[in-house]
Image: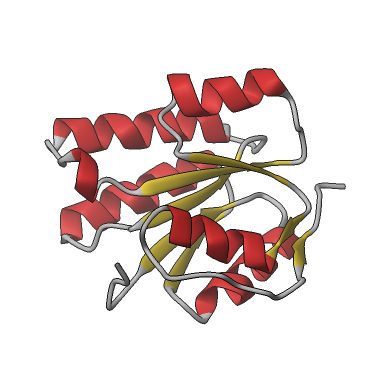
Amino acid sequence: MVRDSLRVLVADDSSSALRFLEEALGGVAEVAEAVNGLEAVRCFAAAMELGRTFDAVFMDIMMPEVDGLTAVKKIRRMESAAEVPPERRAGIVMLSSLSDARHMMEAQYECGADLYLTKPVERATLLEALANLGLTVGPFMENDRVPPKS
């Protein structure tokens, strides 16, 4: 299913990664940006209050203020408190420069993330993630990448 007005929140403390994510996803969605987990949680909460929830969240794991794993837990708690049904919850994609199995397991099983992608990420992979979440239709062939953190 393709949604008419797809809304995506991207959270990363790297300005180059944020720029890439906005450019990569901007053609298929309205994109909001956050530079850390605390800002992402606040942005998500504000969107919920306005009734303009996000369909997807792309969240870096290692960020200042509040890390991505903690931010995802808080987002899932907000959705639960608001009694958002599972099929209406945001699809959450964790992004990390680490291909560490512990982080992957924690992201998906303890925090409630739906997918885990290791940087560098190609644009096609981001769009495929949206398709796997049932938000857009794939496949995509572009070869752009989210740069790893330096």
Vertical relation: 101 (above or below) 141: above
Percent across and percent down for residue 114 are: 45, 39
Residue at left 40%, top 55%? 56
Q: Nearer the viewer, residue 16 or 111?
A: 111
| Residue that protrudes farthest toward the right in the picture | 150
| Residue in view at x 22 percent, y 46 percent | 87
Q: Position of residue 53 (x, y in %)?
A: 26, 57
Q: Position of residue 36 (x, y in %)?
A: 57, 45
- Looking at this view, is 125 or 14 the one in front? 125
Q: Estimate the x, y position of residue 86 in percent, counting from the top left.
A: 22, 39
Q: Is residue 77 left or right of residue 99?
A: left
Residue with the most extreme bottom position: 27
> Where does the N terminus fall, quadrant-wise?
bottom left
- Above or below, 23 relative to 34: below
The answer to which of 142 and 10 lies nearer the viewer is 142
Applied colour scheme: secondary structure
Residue drawn where x is 28% and y is 29% of the image: 77
Residue 25 makes an appearance in the image: yes
Residue 66 appears in the figure: no
How many numbered callouts?
Answer: 0
Using the rendered view, name the quadrant where residue 23 is placed: bottom right
Residue at the far front in the pictured view: 139
Residue visible at 23% across and 38% down in the picture: 79
Q: Is residue 86 left or right of residue 115?
A: left
